[in-house]
Each structure stands twice: as C-alpha cells, then as structure tokens.
Image: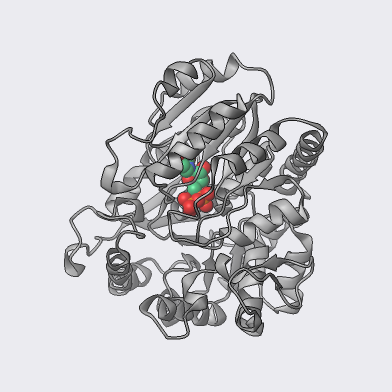
Amino acid sequence: MGREIHMFFFPYFAHGHVIPTVDMAKLFASRGVKTTIVTTPVNASFFSNTIQRSRESGIHIAVELLKFPAADVGLPEGCESTDLLPTSPDENFETMMKFMQAVQLLQEPFEKLLREFKPDCLVADLFFPWATDAANKFGIPRLVFQGTSYISLCVMECMRIYEPHKKVQSDSEPFVVPNLPGDIKLTKSQLPDFLKQDVETDFSKIVKANREAELKSYGVVVNSFYELEAPYADYFRNVLGKKAWHIGPLSLCNRENIDKAERGKKSAIDEHECLKWLDSKEPNSVLYICFGSMTCFTSAQLKEIAMALEASELQFIWVVRKQKNNEEDDDWLPEGFEKRREGKGLIIRGWAPQVFILDHVAIGGFVTHCGWNSTLESVCAGVPMVTWPTFAEQFYNEKLVTQVLKIGVAVGAQKWARVVGDFVKMEAIERAVKELMKGDKADEMRNRAKALAEAAKKAIEKGGSSHSDLNALIEEIGLRSQ
Ligand code: UDP
C-alpha cells in the first residue's frame, strides 16, 4: 500500500459545474482518495448537506473556502454563482464579464492553499485557465474538467482547426464538421458568438486562455462513458492526441432518493409531494420539461410552451425559470391554464429535484436544453429527449442525442442565443413532444434509451469502462506521488 493520495477539486461557480464536481469528489473519496473541494462560502452552502450525508456514510470530503472578490469588480456581495448575477447574461453580458474577472483574481489565494496542502493532483474547471500554471509552480499535475461530452470537445477542436463555418454563404447553410465521424451537420447560426466574430473580444481571449492551459495540463477528465460515444472518445484520444479519462456518468454515484433530490439548490417542491404525484401516474406517461440552471425564457416563449402542452394533452412536470426582469409575474400563463391542467400538469417555479424526477418510472420523456449534465442524467434514467439547445455547446450535444444515438427529437431550434435561446412556435413544440411520447418511433427511441441506461450502469461497475479508467487514473496519480 502506498501513501494516501490527496486530490483537490475546484469547480467553476455555476450549478452545472459544481454539481458534477461534487459527485466526482464523492466518487474519488469512495475509492479511498483524500478529497478536498475548494470553493466559496455561497457555493459551499449549496452542497453542505451532501457533504454531511457523505460523512455520515463514512465518506469524508473536506472543503476549503476562498473569499469571492465580488466587491473588487463591482458586483454585489454574495454574488458568487452565475445564476446569482443581478442581471442575466443575455440582458447584460458586462456583469458576466465582471464575474469572470473576479474568477481571475482568485489565483493568489488559491496558490496559498496549494502551498499549504500540496495535494497530489488538482482537478480544476476549464474556466480557471491560470490553474495549470499555479499547479505547475508546486509540481502538481493539473487535470482539466470541462463538464461536457466527448462529441462537443471534438466538434470544438475541429471547428477551430478547419473553420468550416467560414466557407458557407449564409447563416442557415448546413456544413459538415470536417474530419469527424458521423457526418455531423451544423449551421453558422447554431455556433457560439465568439466563433463567429472576427475580432478578438474579452470572452474570446478567455476561450483562448482556457485552451492554452488545457494544452499545458496533465490531461482531461470527462463525465461520460465509452459506450455512449465511442467514436468520439477514440477521436479525442487517438486523432486529437489528448490524454483523457472518462469516469462517468458521475450522477450515478447518487443512489439514495435524498441524494438524487438534493443536488444544487434547495428544491422549490417538497420531494414527498412530488413523489406522491408521480406515483399516481402510469409508467412513461409524464413529460418532464426543464432547461437547466441558466436558460431563462421570455414570457412569450413560456406561453408558447404552455399552449403546446395543453394542445398535446400530455401530462407533465414543467420547471419554469423566467428572465430576471419580470420574475414575479405570471403573465405568461394562458388564462385558466393551471385549473384546466390540474392533476395532469405540475409547474415547479424554481429549482426541481431533477435526477429524482427523471429516475421515476412515470417519466417518459424530457424536454431539455441539452446541457451535458441533463443529457447524461436522461440517458442514465433511460428517458428519450426533445432537444431544445439554447447556447454554450448545447447544439453539439443535440447532435449526439438525435443523430448519433437516435434517442431524441429536435424541436427545431436554429439559433444560438445566450441564455434565452431561439424562439420556437407552439406547433413545433407540440409536434416534437407528441412524437417523443406516442407511437412506434417513440417506443424505439425509448428502447434505445433504456439500453443505454443499462450500459451506463455497467460502465461504472467493476470491470466497466469508466471504472477501469478511474482505476487507471488513480493508479497513475499514486505512482507520480511516490
Ligand atoms: N438541475 C436541477 N434542478 C433544476 C435545474 C437543474 O437539479 O431545476 C441540475 C440538473 O440535474 C443538472 C444541472 O442542474 O445536474 C444543470 O446542468 P446542465 O449541464 O444540464 O445545464 P446548465 O445548468 O449548465 O445549463
């Protein structure tokens, strides 16, 4: 037996990053690795119950706190997570950039912690480009956690190398991502702003710095499993030459209902109430609709969704997040909607216990923005999807779901638009949700999704692909640290 390995985990301050990182720390800790999560007080409060429950079950995860320098960049105190920004990034991207500026100021206090604890390895989020240099100063290998799929990592790299979007005549002309398996077709309008801009912006500088830091890092950990996206796992490692370990799906480390229900923020619904409602439904009969922790639709878009749900006559759980400027009003609900859908539809205003809901047998489909965590959680639950990407790398994940795995129906979103997404009409939503929930095609998609859920469970068991990669990674860190 060698000496105990100590790993540091440093998630970006957004729920879509903190949640899988906490799961990852639990996973490593359950394998006997000493783990410490470095974060800020507000972010720590989101997962303190999880840490407490882990400790009670014999898995100890330490937490080290850094003060978030909100005031130094002109942000309100306590604004330590992207969803706590006073304005959403589509309303005011400046605030988002201030937030990113604050993140850059953390290097010095973070280095102090590295000096004090000298961990054997640092798993730091993509959005801390300075973390590679910081770790190198102390001879600590830095792994990058990007929080996305292999396919997205591959598409991003191919777009950077081949720039196919520069060769099309219009925003809507499809192009194939060059040199990548699977004939992945995209349009320029589905690409992030920074890729389309010819001039360098503050954000594109951050993207560049992230990439350079990744190149200098020890490797990449991926929340995925080989069987889900084998061609892209192979491409990433063998063609793009990256050192990567896939250790997911990370959400599967949550086996108890309470752990599935309490991830991220406090739920806006009591999980017992939610369970009672779901228990009263037939298997595969309820549609779950949620767009992650960042996407906020306009009232007009929410109204279209409401009308589509009513017209489809489907039963549903709908998690509603609105733009911050009119969070209080219910002006988006058609007159009498909730009364008419009583017993058939449940609206959750705020945070939902997502994995708990998805894992219930009553759930038959998920309308998702294709954030990678949500996508993977749906796969783990064997639930097919209506894909409605809005921004970030979500359009790439959509291709995996609809085109490669064939476990989803695209709603038809065409335009990348930060946080608010493309406007989609009621008819398109109704068509997609009906196609997902009813008929032979729906059954085929559901069967494929169920098979993938089985494969996901096998991947993390002894002898499975993710289990083996995790073993290999722990062993390698152990050898380095001797
Ligand atoms: N989530 C949740 N309840 C909500 C909204 C989101 O539990 O009401 C969780 C979801 O299960 C996932 C994460 O928050 O783990 C969102 O990550 P994802 O990558 O899907 O999207 P993002 O929020 O980063 O856009």
**Residue 187 drawn at (x, y percent):** 63, 68
Q: Is residue 362 above or below residue 69?
A: above
Tell me which corner region of the image, top left, top right, bottom left or bottom right, holds residue 230. bottom right
Tell me which corner region of the image, top left, top right, bottom left or bottom right, holds residue 170. bottom right
Question: What is the quadrant of the N terminus in the image?
Answer: bottom right
**Along the line of sight, which residue is nearer the eye, 193 or 300?**
300
Tell me which corner region of the image, top left, top right, bottom left or bottom right, holds residue 289. top right
Identified at 50% across, 68% down, the residue is 120
What is the tally of numbered marks visible in this picture?
Answer: 0
**Along the line of sight, which residue is nearer the eye, 468 or 446?**
446
Question: What is the quadrant of the C terminus in the image?
Answer: bottom right
Identified at 70% across, 51% down, the residue is 401
Q: Is residue 237 above or below residue 84?
A: below
Q: Is residue 360 above or below residue 416?
A: above
**Along the line of sight, which residue is nearer the eye, 421 or 263?**
421
Q: Is residue 342 left or right of residue 41?
A: right
Identified at 53% across, 77% down, the residue is 214
**Residue 12 drawn at (x, y percent):** 41, 60
Q: Is residue 204 left or right of residue 167?
A: left
Q: Does residue 85 show up?
A: yes
**Residue 115 drawn at (x, y percent):** 35, 72
**Residue 478 drawn at (x, y percent):** 60, 66
